[in-house]
Image (cartoon, rainbow, N blue to C red):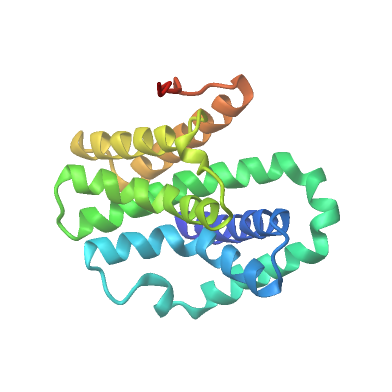
């Protein structure tokens, strides 16, 4: 199940990255680069940190074709994309949860301690968006009020907790996926967010 969701998610993330590039008036090459790093950047950073070689997408060139094609296709469909905003939000939420679970599983299979497993899941889930926003000269969405990184953290902790409780891997994945997707969509609908910190010091 996660493989199918993963393919849908990286295509959706690539399209979201392409739209972000379009808002910054980037050329076609820029669109392709932003689409690529948005979709595959989180997994790349995770593999580099964990020392997992070769890096995942280098062994699956079809992922490269998929995300770049999705990014370039967005250029042609951009005038219609705003009608699909709700679908994109759902796909983005699916991608966040799927990436988080995949990241957790990768670190767990490599024998890393629990804290590293959680960080691996979060890095996989959110870092593509962080790189995209930095390259587009924006404050990353995960550092603002939205419940985004928090959802990834909750999914990772639930995944590990259910695993410790002896829940079968497939059932564990299904429960965590449903929980994470529901939490993210509920947060969007209700406007939930974390408290923000605003500090402005007056210099005399």
Please report the residue visible at 50 percent of the width from the left and 51 percent of the height from the top. Answer: 129
Towards the viewer: 91 or 175? 91
- Quadrant the C terminus occupies: top left
* Position of residue 151 in the picture relative to residue 46 (left or right): right
Compared across the picture, whether 169 is left or right of 126 comes to left
> In this view of the protein, which residue sits in the foreground, 174 or 112?
112
- Residue 86 in the image: state x and y as whole percent: 71, 39
In the displayed structure image, the side of residue 93 where residue 29 appears, left or right = right
Residue pictured at 39% horizontal, 47% vertical:
100
Q: Is residue 21 above or below residue 153?
A: below
Q: Position of residue 16 (x, y in %)?
A: 64, 53
Furthest-right residue in this view? 79
Determine the residue positioned at 77% across, 64% down.
75
Picture coordinates of residue 71 (x, y %)? 67, 66
Give the quadrant of residue 163: top left
Q: Nearer the viewer, residue 200 or 34?
A: 200
């Amino acid at each position: 199940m996660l493989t199918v969701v993963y393919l849908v998610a990286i295509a959706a993330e690539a399209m979201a990255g392409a739209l972000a590039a379009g808002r910054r008036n980037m050329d076609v090459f820029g669109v392709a680069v932003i689409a690529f790093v948005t979709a595959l950047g989180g997994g790349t950073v995770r593999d580099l940190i964990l020392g997992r070689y070769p890096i995942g997408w280098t062994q699956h060139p079809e992922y490269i074709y998929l995300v770049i094609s999705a990014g370039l296709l967005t250029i042609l469909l951009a005038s219609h994309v705003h009608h699909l905003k709700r679908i994109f939000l759902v796909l983005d939420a699916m991608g966040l949860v799927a990436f988080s679970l995949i990241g957790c599983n990768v670190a767990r299979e490599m024998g890393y301690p629990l804290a590293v497993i959680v960080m691996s899941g979060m890095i996989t889930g959110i870092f593509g968006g962080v790189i995209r926003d930095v390259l587009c000269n924006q404050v990353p969405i995960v550092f603002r009020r939205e419940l985004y990184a928090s959802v990834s953290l909750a999914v990772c902790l639930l995944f590990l907790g259910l695993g410790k409780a002896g829940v079968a891997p497939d059932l564990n994945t299904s429960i965590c996926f449903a929980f994470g997707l529901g939490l993210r969509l509920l947060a969007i609908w209700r406007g939930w967010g974390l408290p923000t910190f605003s500090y402005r010091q007056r210099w005399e």
